[in-house]
Amino acid sequence: MLLFRDEEHVTRWCDTRNIARGATITPEQGWRLAHGWYKDKLRPDWRRHTLEEAERLLADVGLTGPFWNLRG
């Protein structure tokens, strides 16, 4: 995970390293994703998210498109 000031900073960082740009998320999306993913992790009845639950969580946070496709 890398933190950047803005979209221009991401582009410049990738360009100087000749790295293809991946997906970016906002701090709010990161918080919402982490909260949804880990909120019940310490409960005794915790279980791994199903593929459908994970897809719904990503979509609810606004993370859609090919990069976020969990089905390969």
Image (cartoon, rainbow, N blue to C red):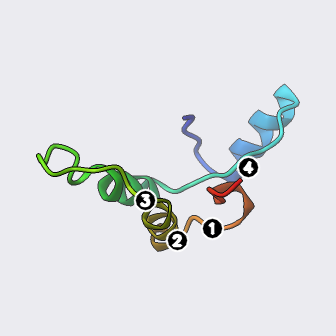
Asked if the residue at tag 1 contacts the one at tag 2, i.e. Cβ–Cβ closer than 8 Å, the answer is yes
Mark nearest the camera among 3 and 1 is: 3
Pointer 2 or 3: first along the chain:
3
Name the residue at 83% across, 26% down.
17
From the image, tell me which residue sits under label 4: 8
From the image, tell me which residue sits under label 1: 64
Image position, residue 71 (x, y; %) = 66, 58
Q: Secondary structure at mark 1?
A: loop
From the image, tell me which residue sits under label 2: 59
Location of residue 28 with respect to 45 vertically, above or below: below
Mark nearest the camera among 1 and 4 is: 1
Mark nearest the camera among 4 and 3 is: 3
Q: Amino acid at mark 2?
A: Ala
Q: Secondary structure at mark 2?
A: helix
Pointer 1 or 4: first along the chain:
4
Asked if the residue at tag 2 contacts the one at tag 4, i.e. Cβ–Cβ closer than 8 Å, the answer is no
Mark nearest the camera among 4 and 2 is: 2
Image position, residue 72 (x, y; %) = 71, 53
User: Camera-side residue: 30 or 50?
Assistant: 50
From the image, tell me which residue sits under label 3: 50
Q: Amino acid at mark 3?
A: Thr
- Crowd around label 1: few <14 · some 14–19 · many ≥20 (10 Å): some
User: Camera-side residue: 70 or 62?
Assistant: 70
User: Camera-side residue: 59 or 18?
Assistant: 59
Relative to 62, 8 lies left or right = right
CA separation, marks 4 and 3?
36 Å
CA separation, marks 2 and 3?
14 Å
